[in-house]
Amino acid sequence: MKKINIGLMAHVDAGKTTVTEQFLFHTGAIRTVGNVDKGTAHTDFLGVERNRGISVKAAVTMLETRNLSINLIDTPGHVDFSGEVERTLMVIDGVILIVSAVEGVQAHTEIIWEVLKKRGIPVIFFINKIDRMGADVEAVISQIKERLTSDLCVLYKVEDQGQESASIIKQDITEYVAERNEVILEEYLRGSVTNEAVIDGARDMILSGNLFPVLCGSAMYGIGIDELLDSVVEFFPYAGGDCGAPVSGIVFKVEYDPSMGKIAHIRLYQGSLHNRDSVVIAGGKREEKITQIRKFSGEKYKDVGLVEAGDIAALCGLSSVSVGDIIGCKEDVPQMVKWVRPLLNVAVFPSDQNDIQTLVKALTILNEEDPLLEFFNSRETSELLLSITGMIQTEVLTELLRERFKLEVSFGKPSVIYKETPLMEAEGFDAYTMPKPCWAVLKFKIEPGPVGSGIIYKSEVPPKKIPYRYQNHVELAVPRALQQGLKGWEVVDAKITLIDGEYHDIHTHPLDFFVATPMALMKGLQNAGTAMLEPMLSFRIVVPEEFGGKVIGEIINMRGNFNSPNIENGRFIITGVFPVSTSLEFPIRLASITSGKGIVSTRFHSYQKCPKDVEAFRPFRGVNPLNRSKFILWARNALGQFGSEV
Ligand SMILES: Nc1nc2c(ncn2[C@@H]2O[C@H](COP(=O)(O)OP(=O)(O)OP(=O)(O)O)[C@@H](O)[C@H]2O)c(=O)[nH]1
Ligand SMILES: [Mg+2]
């Protein structure tokens, strides 16, 4: 059976889970439609999702319809859970982007749209909630045109919107397609164009990212659902791959099953896997045996025993996998687009100190499921630290820890994740020639780079002095070493040049340059000094006109910059940039200033230099290379362990 892999994405509350529910119902997978508001939706099955009526985790479900199998991933819409959307994007070939007919395009819709465009993923728009009072499909289409894309092809028109009796009427798209496709235009003018030819023509444009169909409906009342499924089948690509080729796949989601333990959701790009097959994980680091292969439909699953190239399935038995691990060889797995960045660090405390070990285990498990959490157990401060994208995430983590691990926890005050950048040009030198056997001598030039440039590395050392294979080690080691600068934060916006160095025919050991690079770089950073960078958000604030002055005062207090405000129909609209650190509480303040009549939307803008008085240290992970002899012992040990990885 042919397969299609798709994702449902949107801003929070647009109706993704309700659409999924209707898909399951319309394809016969469930007999009654569950309801998000009653906590009975089939893809929101975590207690915290049911209690809150929001999705927290991406949920995979399979539909069989129209002689096809569709793997559908319902993603959470809340910004704090964008990591789930990022991981889903690794494995799908088409996206239904839902926009509410009442709330319209939101800042989060734009963010998702930009990523979809970058990945070149075909998109179908679904304007949902046409039954609700205030629904205005025309206005939403204009917003999409203005803020996302003008290459829209409207497949259905709406009638009686804003009422339960709303309905949709199919539009003829022949002319639209003919205007953009010469072959179809000729056939059209001759009067011989077929419906199939029009669909094929539209499909080509959709797959090449030049056309985006727009449908509308009401997930609540099942309007437009069959039509949306038709469009998925007509326009989205079939997943391919060679079932006989060597296995190549990726783990995009990990969850726990009370009886089977860890379950790894994978997409297989090449090859086939059967129950009891052994698979190589993470580039040969481990090998484990599959005990069961599951396909989920709602909460129910079948043990299907086989997964083939192109398909998505859940593997049981792989106890050591984490999200992002490669299964088999990596050549056929597409590169992941990373766009979600946690901006906050937060400490977790158990209510009962005796629970500390259980909490460490629980957080390790949660981190395997969500690598962005970057769980760190600091020996220096004996704190358990997590990276998070927002405060709702801590509330959900509290509930998850209670529900799954019976742990009561509290969170500390969040602090922002800073970065460091060199203050001025300097050199860093290290001669790693003792304790023998070893020989790696390196001298780097470190220079400040332009804002947003990351790390730019080059070597001016000829292979006579350091052969290419060792230079490759240096190149790999530089970004790793710069994960932590003088104050413990990641170093960015720096130009690093290898200007001199030396190896030794006899004494150089294969991994010596991995040990020497962090030591030389850290000395260089010490010579240059580093400035701290803080994350900034761009914001858009809309308030009733009378609050304009107050809002400007707030922005100035937060060290924000703003563009000249606009006033439209009594609404005061202001955009600009402010620091994350000063604006954490702003949404709450705005709500209280405006009695809930203000709206603020923010998104990550950039990392910029902090005011001079801001200084914060992050506990060092591992051993600081400035602590030279301890570092050498530690690094030799660690490299010995992970030798196959480097
Ligand atoms: N009137 C109306 N309400 C809808 C419709 N679709 C969804 N809703 C309601 O909108 C709310 C959010 O629906 P969900 O399906 O949970 O939305 P979601 O996009 O999955 O939300 P998150 O996963 O939390 O981002 C719920 O109260 C639904 O009952 C619709 O077509 N019409
Ligand atoms: Mg949902």
Image (cartoon, rainbow, N blue to C red):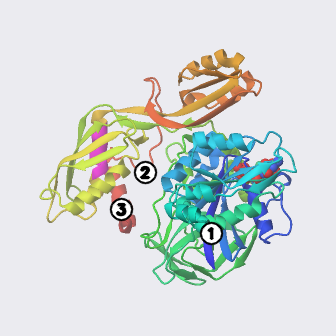
Q: Residues within 10 Å of mark 3 (few under 14, many from 20)?
A: some
The answer for how far apart the CA atoms under marks 3 and 2 are is: 13 Å
Distance from mark 2 CB to nearest ligand 1 atom below 8 Å: no
Q: Nearer the viewer, residue 577 or 199?
A: 199
Residue type beneath disc 1: Thr
Q: Is residue 108 shown above or below 218?
A: above
Q: Among all residues in the image, which is located at the extreme front?
A: 190
Mark 2 lies on residue? 622
Q: Nearer the viewer, residue 102 or 460?
A: 102
Looking at the image, is mark 1 or mark 2 earlier in the sequence?
A: 1
Residue type beneath disc 2: Gly
Q: Residues within 10 Å of mark 2 (few under 14, many from 20)?
A: few
Q: Which numbered disc covers residue 194?
A: 1
> Looking at the image, can residue 45 be seen?
no
Looking at the image, is mark 3 or mark 1 earlier in the sequence?
A: 1
Q: Which numbered disc covers residue 253?
A: none
* Res 4 → quadrant: bottom right
Element assignment for label 3: helix
Image quadrant in which the N terminus is located: bottom right
Of circles 1 and 2, the one toward us is: 1
The answer for how far apart the CA atoms under marks 3 and 1 are is: 64 Å
> Looking at the image, can residue 9 be seen?
yes
Q: Find residue 408 and report its horizontal and vertical position in percent.
A: 73, 49
Q: What residue span does the magenta drawing correspond to?
A: 517-525
Residue type beneath disc 3: Leu
Mark 3 lies on residue? 639
